[in-house]
Amino acid sequence: MEDERRPRRKPRKAIGERIREASEGMDVPGQLLPGFYHVELVQNRQAVVDGVKGVLSYSETQIQLNLQAVVVTFKGAGLSIRSYQTEQLILTGTIAEVHFTA
């Protein structure tokens, strides 16, 4: 009697990786996918951030945002939140640094 072993399956990819791969093929905007965020800098004077779950800290020199999977920190001078609506935030000022922390 032959040994009928099943072929080994490849390890499953994390759900975030599978969603990212699927979205690339469908050209779906990131804000429509759960757990995804989009950060766009306009020179060093403005940042548009999609996927914001909350503001963790706010001052003229530092703004920290909760993006669910990560925290993004903007450092600079004269930072202010110009707009915050439905998970999209626009901040202005002189942006010197951007840090992502898992």
Image (spheres, helix red, strand yellow):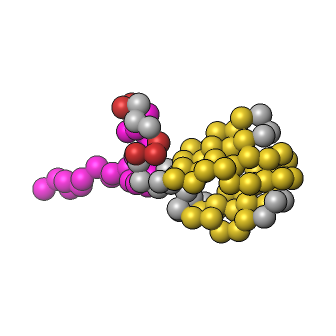
Quadrant housing residue 45: top right
| Residue sitting farthest toward the front | 82
Is 90 placed above or below 64 here? above
Residue in view at x 72 percent, y 41 percent: 46
Asked whether residue 91 is in view, the answer is yes
Magenta region includes residue 2 = yes
Asked whether residue 99 is in view, the answer is no
Q: In the picture, which quadrant includes the N terminus? A: bottom left
Residue 90 horizontal/vertical position (percent): 64, 47
The residue nearer to you, when weighing 5 against 59, is 59
The residue nearer to you, when weighing 37 against 17, is 37
Residue 4 as seen in the image, left or right of residue 34: left
The residue nearer to you, when weighing 69 against 84, is 84
Residue in view at x 84 percent, y 59 percent: 61
Residue 42 as seen in the image, left or right of residue 22: right
Residue 81 horizontal/vertical position (percent): 68, 54
| Residue sitting farthest toward the bottom | 56
Residue in view at x 66 percent, y 50 percent: 82
**Which residues lie in the magenta part?**
1-24
Is 31 placed above or below 70 here? above
